[in-house]
Image: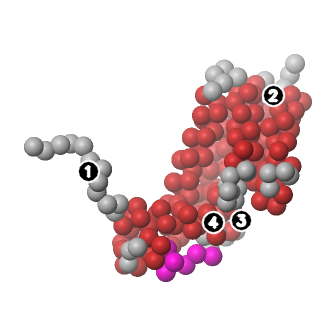
Amino acid sequence: MSSDRPDVTAKPRAAEKILNAARDLFYREGIRAVGVDEIVETAGVTKPSLYRSFPSKDELAAAYLRDYEIGFWSRFETALARHPGDPRAGIVAYFSGVSQRQALTNYRGCALTNAAVEFPEPGSPARLVSEANKRALRARLELLAGDMGADDPALLADGLLMLFEGANASGQIFGVGGPVRSLAVVADRLIGASVRR
């Protein structure tokens, strides 16, 4: 008797093992600091398996960031969905979540931001994924700012994006007790000052 369901006892494929190992190593140590040898050793695969799955370490880094981005947008959209018809409350809820994530063990901020800093050269696969995410976030924030009735939606979006990026950097410097503890309040006040009464 055959079944259309996948075999849940099947071992992960090499590509999945490699991506899982890279995800942890890249986020914890930084993409450039991690060598291919460390990835294959952690994944328990061979170097040829890595290059069959990913043409280069750069492409593996881009795959890691695309995977990270799924979670990023999920958290963002979930916060908004909890407050239907109230983008202000949704954005404040998202920023509150960012503050809470700073308290997690080994939290190193936004992987997409970290990669953009690590790869300043235009055209690198990791940078392209990071830039596309930040541009999409800026555009999404601008639409939400317009929905809230901001006097200048682009200006409010820029301010919110800078708060987000600053939170990721300051969280790594100061930790939970630093400025990130005020992130949601500052975001709410910025929105309040930018929206028509």
Q: Which mark is residue 117?
A: 3
Indicate yes or no whether the magenta region holds residue 94: no
Magenta region, residue range: 33-39
Question: Position of 150 compared to 81: left or right?
Answer: right
Q: In what element is the residue under mark 4?
A: helix
Residue 47 location, x and y as percent? 40, 79
Residue located at (86% from left, 38% from top): 186
- According to the picture, the residue beneath numbered tag 2 turns out to be 150
**Label 3, residues with CA under 10 Å away: few <14, some 14-19, many ≥20:** few
Q: Which mark is residue 7?
A: 1
Residue located at (63% from left, 65% from top): 28
Mark 2 vs 3: CB contact within 8 A:
no
Q: Residue furthest left?
A: 1
Q: Quadrant of the C terminus?
A: top right
- According to the picture, the residue beneath numbered tag 4 turns out to be 28
> Which amino acid, mark 4?
Arg
Q: Nearer the viewer, mark 4 or mark 3?
A: 4
Mark 2 vs 4: CB contact within 8 A:
no
